[in-house]
Amino acid sequence: MGKVSINVNGRAFAVGCEDGEEEAVAALGRQFDGHVTELAEQVGQIGDLRLFLMAALVLADELREKTGTCEKLRAQVAALKNSHSEGERHQHDATDNAASALHEAADRIEKLVSALATADQ
């Protein structure tokens, strides 16, 4: 099991993690420290617990916004896939209609050729 030392608000914390996840955990720690530092600059040093709670709420709010954005994007992708499927159906129908029209035209041409051949005799 890996271990990472994270500094938050000037204090070091030892955090355990899965082997190979050390850099990812350290990056998360830096992100959290950034939020705590920003909040401390805004509201002052009101204690680690309150700063940590406020930072956690800020991160939770960011996650909620990003989750909402992700859901909207998923809905747009689903709509585009549906639209694409409808477009393929319309294309298939148009191809079928064109094939039918060509077949009918070929039949009429054959009848005309047959009529012309009969008229020439």
Image (spheres, rainbow, N blue to C red):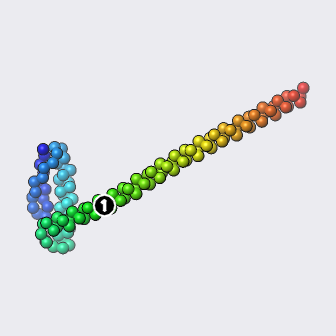
x 81%, y 34%: residue: 112
Asked whether, in this view, residue 73 is left or right of residue 53, the answer is right
Q: Quadrant of residue 110?
A: top right
User: Is residue 19 placed above or below 34 in the rendered structure?
Assistant: above
Q: In the image as oriented, which residue stretches furthest toward the top?
A: 121
Amino acid type at mark 1: Arg
x 17%, y 64%: residue: 52
Residue 35 seen in this snapshot = no
Q: Position of residue 85 (x, y in %)?
A: 51, 46
x 33%, y 61%: residue: 65
SS at mark 1 in the image = helix
Residue 87 seen in this snapshot = yes
x 33%, y 59%: residue: 66
Q: Residues within 10 Å of mark 1 (few under 14, many from 20)?
A: few
Q: Quadrant of residue 75?
A: bottom left
Say which residue label 1 marks. Answer: 64
Asked whether, in this view, residue 107 is left or right of residue 55, the answer is right
Q: Position of residue 10 (x, y in %)?
A: 11, 63
Q: Quadrant of residue 39?
A: bottom left
Asked whether, in this view, residue 19 is left or right of residue 118, the answer is left
Residue 76 versus residue 27: which sits nearer the camera? 76
User: Is residue 45 placed above or below 74 in the rendered structure?
Assistant: below
The N terminus is located in which quarter?
top left
Number of on-image labels = 1
Q: Position of residue 11 (x, y in %)?
A: 9, 61
Q: In the image as oriented, which residue stretches furthest toward the bottom?
A: 43
The C terminus is located in which quarter?
top right
